[in-house]
Image (cartoon, rainbow, N blue to C red):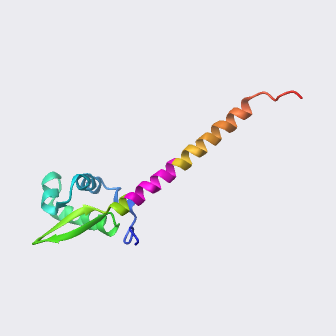
Amino acid sequence: MNTNQGGDGWTALGDPTRRAIVEFLAERPRAVGELAAELPVSRPAVSQALKVLKDAGLVTERVAGTRRIYRLNPVAVAALRDQLDTFWSRALTNYGEAVGQLAAEGQPEESP
């Protein structure tokens, strides 16, 4: 299953409104009206932001009567976390190697 079908999750999270929606959905699933009541943007703006998040695979929806209930896609969120873990691990490894190299260059040579 491709959790990033229509766009990049990182790009989708680049907008403050979309990040706020993700934060609210991390608490519990919500309808557009509930989200709009919590945000300083219009209901259509919330719907547009949800579409971007859904296209990026970060949000799923289900129909409940006349409402659509949105929730985070745990698979996509886990994939973003895995990417962050990989980036962080690489950064720490590179930092450790750079520090080790500087330390080795700064030490006097041993005599035979």
Q: Nearer the viewer, residue 6 or 67?
A: 67
The N terminus is located in which quarter? Answer: bottom left
Magenta extent: 78-88
Q: Residue 53, how many percent across, how many down?
A: 30, 64
Depicted 94 relative to depicted 64: above or below: above
Q: Nearer the viewer, residue 102 or 74?
A: 74
Q: Residue 110, how many percent across, how many down?
A: 83, 28
Depicted 91 relative to depicted 36: above or below: above
Give the residue displayed 41% in from the left and 54% down from the top. Answer: 81
Q: Main secondary structure of the magenta part?
A: helix
Report whether 35 appears left or right of 4: left
Q: Nearer the viewer, residue 2 or 37?
A: 2
The C terminus is located in which quarter? Answer: top right
Residue projecting furthest to the left: 66
Give the residue displayed 47% in from the left and 51% down from the top. Answer: 85
Q: Residue 62 sits in which quadrant?
A: bottom left
